[in-house]
Image (tube, helix red, strand yellow):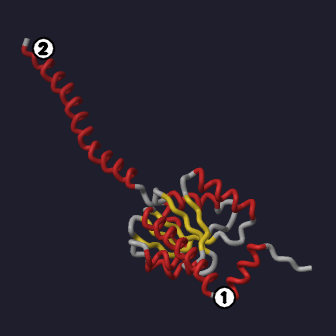
Amino acid sequence: MFKLNLNQLQLYNNRLKGKKYLTMRKEKKNQLVDSIAEQLNNSPTIYITDISDLNAETTSNLRRLCFKRDIKLVVVKNTLLKRAMEKSDKNLAELYVALKGSTSLMFAESGNAPAKLIKEFRKKSDKPYLKGAYVEEVSYLGNDQLEMLVNIKTKNELIADVIALLQSPAKQVISGLQSGGQKLTGILKALSEKAA
């Protein structure tokens, strides 16, 4: 005998009525789109990847690795993601072509952290596949961009490089003066001994 509980019966009735059930789904979808758009706006780094065909254990390992490296991994539907991208304050239109097949998003603070994770994880698996990325207000399309993304330096790394470059000439001048001072002292001492 076929039995329905009260919740299933209400859902069935709502489907028959049409609007009430669809309105609820539409509201949930809109909430989800708003949530994704907020994440897109708040994250400086967005990677669009494909992790389909990974088994449960491998997917779990990927999620654990993402968690350890402060990368948020989210699986999304392409239609909802496109709506969220359109709603976002960022110009993500170039990435629309990457919205085919299964899609997962990686959000991170560092521009190269997801790329390094993908490269490392691919030593054991052929996925995740990089479909596109948005890093430092620049869009990257295709899996062939992975190596370039791995080599992108973070803002702090660039600042450290600039400081090191600025300190280098100053160190050379100081060491030159110090060594020159010793030479000058030696010459003066030799001249004073010669005169005496």
> In what element is the residue under mark 2?
helix
Question: Residue 188 appears at what percent x and percent y?
Answer: 12, 21
Horizontally, residue 2 falls left or right of residue 131, namely right
Q: Say which amino acid is labelled 1.
A: Lys
* Residue that carries the numbered disc 1 in the rendered image: 17
Name which residue lies at 64% across and 81% down: 21
Q: Which mark is residue 193?
A: 2
**Which quarter of the rendered picture does the N terminus lie within?**
bottom right
Badge 2, how many Cα within 10 Å: few under 14, some, many 20+? few
Sequence order check: which comes first, mark 2 or mark 1? 1
Please name the residue shown 46% across and 56% down the image: 110
Q: Nearer the viewer, mark 2 or mark 1?
A: 1
Task: Identify the residue at horizontal 52%, vertical 67% (top origin).
Answer: 47
Q: Position of residue 190 (x, y in %)?
A: 15, 19
Q: CA distance from mark 2 to mark 1?
A: 112 Å
Q: Amino acid at mark 2?
A: Glu
Of the pair 142 and 107, the residue shown nearer to us: 107
